[in-house]
């Protein structure tokens, strides 16, 4: 599909605020030199880990530190030069940046600390709901009773918005969630053309019964102009993030949408009659005011896929054939013996295999293992000889998984953000849908509150534990043993007062 913005162009350009030469002055050479020296010093001081060398996959689940703080972040690679971060807790696109992916923490082999964006921010939103409810973007969640002066935590109310999960189609990522009664598929993208770099957000709405209102950008202390399907915002001084650049966005593919700017520079897109709005795209750019016309021309020629739903049934595999190792049987001369399943530690993706959970499928010759680095692998050939172990990379990018359970041959994994149920939709031994089985767990950014273990009882309920934050509890789930109902709908606290409860068993 191709859409043109030419009818908007003649109206829009003349009305956009253009910074004066005084606002566009470049930083002094001394300032630039000092900034480069600081960056060089910080880079020299940082001692990386094996995680830095690892191909973590098309996305990476973690927290995100810095001014775009996101407690439950899915950070998505958009080619080699651009990154977008989605907040699964608040169902919002929290930021997009160019120039890099993530700077991972290094303490305790990368487990102490929070990843940070690596690059220059091009758009961002403040911490709060990504979609309005009854016209409001105010966060409806109260602070936890344990920390009444703290920030709200936990997922959004389900009647407002709810995270469903990630569809992976090759190296492309689709985000699935609900807003009210509307089902949403969102596909982030990035395009470079004619010297212009544009972030895109493609949407497909399955149904809806009320007006939808999408938060796109929070740009404080700006002057905003709206002309047709274009909104542009600029600072009246060059001191803020992005300097004297202009931020602009257009929407494409729907006639029943309008831009609005409210609060202190909040740009949002209001869609009426969402039952009729099936597909649309938002194109986002930041650059020099003189290039605004070029952005409008490039955006007007963009195209996007005819259907996002067609990419939710499984995509092409990306991890190749299984890797083969040879195991070692233990001696049969004692009541207990140990067989060794040799790991494929030398692998093409430099996957750092720090195994943290495992379970067997029904046939007992196949198992699944998870690594705290974010991977899940399948291993076949677990027989009496162990001479032909076949290891297949099955899933990537999970949030420090520390527990794995197989139920009815479906893999469930404990992460700090949620319990994830993994689906192989097309039988190629690679996960295509990372389903949010339950994300009611409340977290903060403290590194120590790991989610550990995963077991089931005779009724099918799940049990796992949550580490403490090395201080007084700030959420209801700090330092607890938790029970999750068989269908994933209800999370209960069973016991409290734990610190680092890495070990759990359930008797017959």
Image (spheres, rainbow, N blue to C red):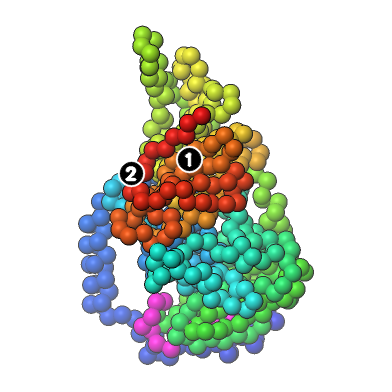
Sequence-wise, which precedes: disc 1 or disc 2?
A: 2
The crowd level at tag 1 (other Cα within 10 Å; few <14, some 14-19, many 20+) is many
Give the percent coordinates (x, y) of residue 440: 52, 56
Given residues 339 and 335, the one toward you in this image is 335
- Seen from this angle, which residue lies furthest right? 276
User: Does the magenta run of residues contain 234?
Assistant: yes
Q: Which residue is mark 1?
A: 454
Q: Which residues are magenta?
A: 229-242
Q: Which residue is mark 2?
A: 50
CA separation in Å, label 1 and label 2: 26 Å
Question: Where, quadrant-wise, is the N terminus in this rendering?
Answer: bottom right
User: Does the magenta run of residues contain 98?
Assistant: no
- Kindly tell me whether residue 319 is visible in this rendering: no
- Image position of 21 (left or right of 89): left
Residue 290 position (above or below residue 385): below
Residue 385 position (above or below residue 120): above
Residue 504: name its quadrant: top left
Per the image, label 2 sits on a secondary structure element best described as helix
Given residues 374 and 285, the one toward you in this image is 374
Give the percent coordinates (x, y) of residue 444: 40, 60
Residue 443: name its quadrant: bottom left
Residue 327: name its quadrant: top left
- Seen at 57% across and 73% down, the residue is 215
- Image position of 205 (left or right of 338): right
Residue 460 position (above or below residue 386): below
Give the percent coordinates (x, y) of residue 390: 50, 26
């Amino acid at each position: 599909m191709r859409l043109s913005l030419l009818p908007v162009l003649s109206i829009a350009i003349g009305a956009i605020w253009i910074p004066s030469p005084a606002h566009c002055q470049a930083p002094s050479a001394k300032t630039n030199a000092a900034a480069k020296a600081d960056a060089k010093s910080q880079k020299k001081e940082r001692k990386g880990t094996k995680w830095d060398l690892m191909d973590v996959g098309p996305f990476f689940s973690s927290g995100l530190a810095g001014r775009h703080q996101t407690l439950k972040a899915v950070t998505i690679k958009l080619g080699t030069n651009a990154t977008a971060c989605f907040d699964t807790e608040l169902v919002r696109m929290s930021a997009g940046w160019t120039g890099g992916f993530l700077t991972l923490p290094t303490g305790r082999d990368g487990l102490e600390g929070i990843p940070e964006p690596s690059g220059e921010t091009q758009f961002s939103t403040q911490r709060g709901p990504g979609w309005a409810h009854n016209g409001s973007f105010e966060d409806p969640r109260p602070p936890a009773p344990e920390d009444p002066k703290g920030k709200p935590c936990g997922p959004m109310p389900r009647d407002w918005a709810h995270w469903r999960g990630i569809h992976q189609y090759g190296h492309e990522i689709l985000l699935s969630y609900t807003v009210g009664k509307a089902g949403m598929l969102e596909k982030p993208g990035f395009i470079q053309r004619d010297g212009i770099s544009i972030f895109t957000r493609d949407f497909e709405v399955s149904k809806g019964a009320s007006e939808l209102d999408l938060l796109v950008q929070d740009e404080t202390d700006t002057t905003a102009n709206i002309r047709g399907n274009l909104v542009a915002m600029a600072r009246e001084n060059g001191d803020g993030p992005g300097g004297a650049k202009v931020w602009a966005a257009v929407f494409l593919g729907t006639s029943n949408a309008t831009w609005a700017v409210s609060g202190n520079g909040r740009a949002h897109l209001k869609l009426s009659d969402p039952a009729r709005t099936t597909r649309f795209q938002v194109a986002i750019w930041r650059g020099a005011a003189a290039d605004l016309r070029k952005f409008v021309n490039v955006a007007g020629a963009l195209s996007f896929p005819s259907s996002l739903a067609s990419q939710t049934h499984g995509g092409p595999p990306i991890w190749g054939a299984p890797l083969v190792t040879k195991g070692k049987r233990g001696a049969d001369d004692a009541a207990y013996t140990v067989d060794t399943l040799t790991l494929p530690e030398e692998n093409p993706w430099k996957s750092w295999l720090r195994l943290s959970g495992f379970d067997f499928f029904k046939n007992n010759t196949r198992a699944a293992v998870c690594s705290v680095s974010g991977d899940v692998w399948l291993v076949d050939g677990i027989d009496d000889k162990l001479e032909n172990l076949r290891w297949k990379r099955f899933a990537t990018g999970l949030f420090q998984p520390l527990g794995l359970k197989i139920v009815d041959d479906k893999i469930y994994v404990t992460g700090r953000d949620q319990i994830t149920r993994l689906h192989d939709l097309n039988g190629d031994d690679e996960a295509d849908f990372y389903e949010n089985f339950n994300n009611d767990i409340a977290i903060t950014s403290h590194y120590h509150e790991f989610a550990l273990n995963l077991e089931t009882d005779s009724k099918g309920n799940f049990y796992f534990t949550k580490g403490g934050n090395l201080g007084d509890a700030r959420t209801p789930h700090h330092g607890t043993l938790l029970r999750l109902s068989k269908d994933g709908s209800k999370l209960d606290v069973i016991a409290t007062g734990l610190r680092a409860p890495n070990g759990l068993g359930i008797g017959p």
